[in-house]
């Protein structure tokens, strides 16, 4: 009898993320993953029902890690500016520690697979960030906005700066590094924009 | 292949290479597999070149599954371990 082997599962997870970041979701198959992780495809099917099952579980597991880091020390009672600063810092920490996982989630967000995990992810984030945002609106710290507009203004600038940092170049081709002062400057503008 | 899964101590996962390349073929095979009480769950991975058939069973052997699938008119061999 063979039992589940967590070391092997971690290796499978790591190789799957690498394959997807390098080759995209479309090129991903169980056969390729088995080869990369140097295990038999038969073994992979013990852990996962099929390709979609693997991708959904992988996505949820990376989101759980991201959630744990992004919500570290966070609680919905924090003043809006403070809570946002913590969110930015935590998301940046996840990105710096796990660049491959960040890139994986970016790719996942625009793949057909995402529909299957989106509800779960939204409810996980929503249960903590929902009360935070509603409280800020009631306290007059944040404009009443559609969620999409709020998210785009609140977080997309950070993700764009992370992308430039990853490439090492800004849009004009000049060397770029996402430093603390740069992050603070961008966050300051975001907070200003979101004020009522 | 005998394996222990998280679903139960005596549940085995058996995997096979097949020619179940279309949903129609899978639906036809379903008429046979769904009747077999020894099969707890089964599915075919359509994304895979080997059209992998995965079966969770408490008592069927590899050979019994192969006989069942080939009896239904499809190609079925053990996926190399």
Image (cartoon, coloured by chain):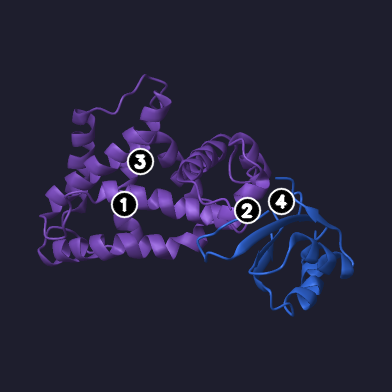
Chain colours: A purple, B blue
User: Which of marks 1 and 2 precedes in the sequence?
Assistant: 2
Q: Which residue is mark 4?
A: B48
Residue at mark 2 to residue at mark 1: CA–CA distance: 28 Å
The subunit letter for the residue under badge 2 reads A
Image position, residue B65 (x, y; %): 77, 65
The subunit letter for the residue under badge 4 reads B
Q: Residue at x 65, y 36 (%)?
A: A35
Q: Which residue is mark 2?
A: A45
Quadrant of the image occupied by residue A156: top left
Q: Which residue is mark 3?
A: A159
Residue at mark 2 to residue at mark 4: CA–CA distance: 11 Å
Circles 2 and 4: CB atoms closer than 8 Å: no
Note whether residue A112 is visible.
no
Image position, residue A152 (x, y; %): 34, 51
Q: Which residue is mark 1?
A: A67
Q: Check disc 1 and report its element: helix, strand or loop.
A: helix
Q: Check disc 4 and report its element: helix, strand or loop.
A: loop
Image position, residue A143 (x, y; %): 20, 60
Are both tags, 2 and 3, on one chain? yes
The subunit letter for the residue under badge 1 reads A
Residue at mark 4 to residue at mark 3: CA–CA distance: 34 Å
């Amino acid at each position: 009898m063979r039992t589940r082997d967590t070391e092997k599962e971690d290796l499978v997870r790591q190789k799957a993320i690498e394959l997807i970041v390098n080759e995209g979701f479309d090129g991903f198959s169980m056969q390729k993953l088995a080869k990369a992780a140097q295990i038999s495809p038969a073994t992979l099917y013990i852990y996962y029902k099929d390709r979609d099952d693997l991708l959904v579980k992988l996505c949820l597991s990376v989101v759980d890690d991201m959630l744990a880091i992004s919500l570290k020390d966070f609680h919905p009672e924090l003043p809006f500016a403070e809570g946002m600063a913590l969110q930015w810092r935590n998301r940046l920490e996840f990105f710096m520690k796990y660049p491959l996982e960040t890139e994986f989630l970016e790719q996942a967000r625009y793949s057909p697979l995402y529909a299957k995990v989106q509800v779960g992810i939204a409810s996980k984030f929503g249960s903590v960030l929902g009360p935070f945002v509603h409280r800020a609106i009631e306290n007059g710290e944040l404009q009443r906005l559609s969620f999409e507009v709020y998210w785009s203004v609140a977080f997309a600038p950070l993700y764009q700066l992370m992308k430039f940092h990853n490439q090492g170049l800004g849009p004009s081709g000049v060397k770029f590094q996402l430093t603390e002062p740069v992050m603070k400057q961008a966050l300051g503008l975001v907070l200003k924009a979101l004020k009522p | 292949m005998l394996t222990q899964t998280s679903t139960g101590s005596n549940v085995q996962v058996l995997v096979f290479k097949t020619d179940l390349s279309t949903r129609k073929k899978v639906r036809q095979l379903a008429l046979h597999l769904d009747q077999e009480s020894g099969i707890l769950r089964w599915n075919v991975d359509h994304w895979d070149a080997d059209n992998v058939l995965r079966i969770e069973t408490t008592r069927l052997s590899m050979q019994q599954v192969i006989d069942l699938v080939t009896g239904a008119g499809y190609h079925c061999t053990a996926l190399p371990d």
